[in-house]
Amino acid sequence: TRKYSSGRKKNRSYKELQFDRILSSNRIHLPELRSAAWNGIPGDCRALAWKVLLNYAPRTESTRRSILQKKRNDYQSIVKKFWDDVPDAARSTNEQMALRQVLVDIPRTLPEVPLFKNQRIKDMMARVLYLYALKNPSTGYVQGFNELICPFMLVYFGGYFDGKEVRACECEGSVEECDEKSLCIEHISDEIFSEVEADTYHSLTILLSNIQTHYTEDQPGLQQNIVKLSKVVKRVDLPLHNHLMDQGMMYQQLCFRWFHNFLLRETSIKNIIRIWDTYLSCSGFGSFHVYVCAAILVQDSEKIRGMPLEEIFQYIQQMHYDDDVNILLSQAYVLSTLFDGNEAHLG
């Protein structure tokens, strides 16, 4: 990771200057970073900010490079020991099943984003997901993890190019046929690829350690959040809650995927990255998500209350959130101030 440098472009906005000051300090003040990140992080500041918010990168600038390098080296050792040097025939039955499921899921990843069809990217995803499953047997690999790593990959690649989006193209590695070599995935160096892969692996591990009970047996964390969602909606929009109950629509059916995949299938990856700025700034990644889901339902309350059960199912399957996520997050924040830490108010 390069030393953070501000002033990458002229005419920086107030927000950009604020993040430049926070991130270029000798020791990043975490409460200040969290407060600023809640409202969104400038693209060219996001990679470092996310790593610090995750407690993956040290807040102290003087030790950051060496500690990140050690973690990246540790990951490369895992790759060599459990991927490069292991023939398929030597893997256990469970390991083969995990790898097979990973390889089945990767081609289905965010089909609207061409980057994830690129073979270098798919190979990286396979290694990260398989090795995560191998090193974390309590959860193993769960369908949907292939999508959870996507924001990390996009943000961390962008960190090498001032936050610009790295893209896929059809140049197939030919410099002559590529107009924007610096942003084309085919022309990104192996060194950058290696660093992004290691950072993605460690970030996924940290993220899932915080929401592990969403994916362990019986998914108690996920179930608890769905119950809390039902209580929030009942409290703030009783007509909507009653309509869902009258139609026989359980919140488990309504919002399971929203909690399992954290809306990665319900809105654009650009919106997801902005939402994750806020989630990562919170003390618990999944806690604020309850209020975001509640805000989505309340926003669409009038529409949903006019639907019979079959149409509600279609609404869930086909929903794609295209509205301003900043407004959504603001509405969720209002709900969180009413109920977070005040469970008695939910009944």
Image (spheres, rainbow, N blue to C red):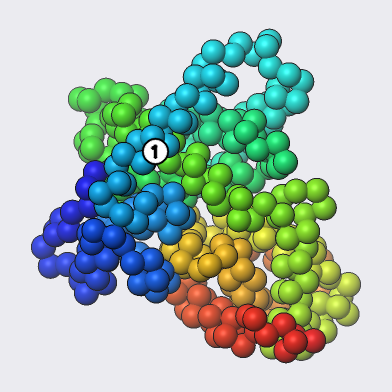
**186, 148: nearer the viewer:** 148
Measuring from the top left, give residue 173's x and y in whole percent. 31, 24
In the rendered image, the residue lying farthest to the left is: 10
Using the image, determine if residue 332 lies above or below residue 178.
below
Q: What's the residue at 72%, 50% (across, down)? A: 215
**90, 319: nearer the viewer:** 90
Determine whether, in the image, residue 321 is placed left or right of residue 221: left
Q: Which residue is mark 1?
A: 196
Q: How many marks?
A: 1
Measuring from the top left, give residue 221's x and y in whole percent. 73, 60
- Mark 1 closeness class: few <14, some 14–19, many ≥20 residues within 10 Å: many
Q: What's the residue at 57%, 21% (across, down)? A: 82
Q: What's the residue at 24%, 44% (across, down)? A: 2
Q: Residue 70: in sight, yes or no?
A: yes
Location of residue 305 by image quarter: bottom right
Using the image, determine if residue 210 lies above or below residue 334.
above
Location of the C terminus by quadrant is bottom right
Which SS class for mark 1?
helix
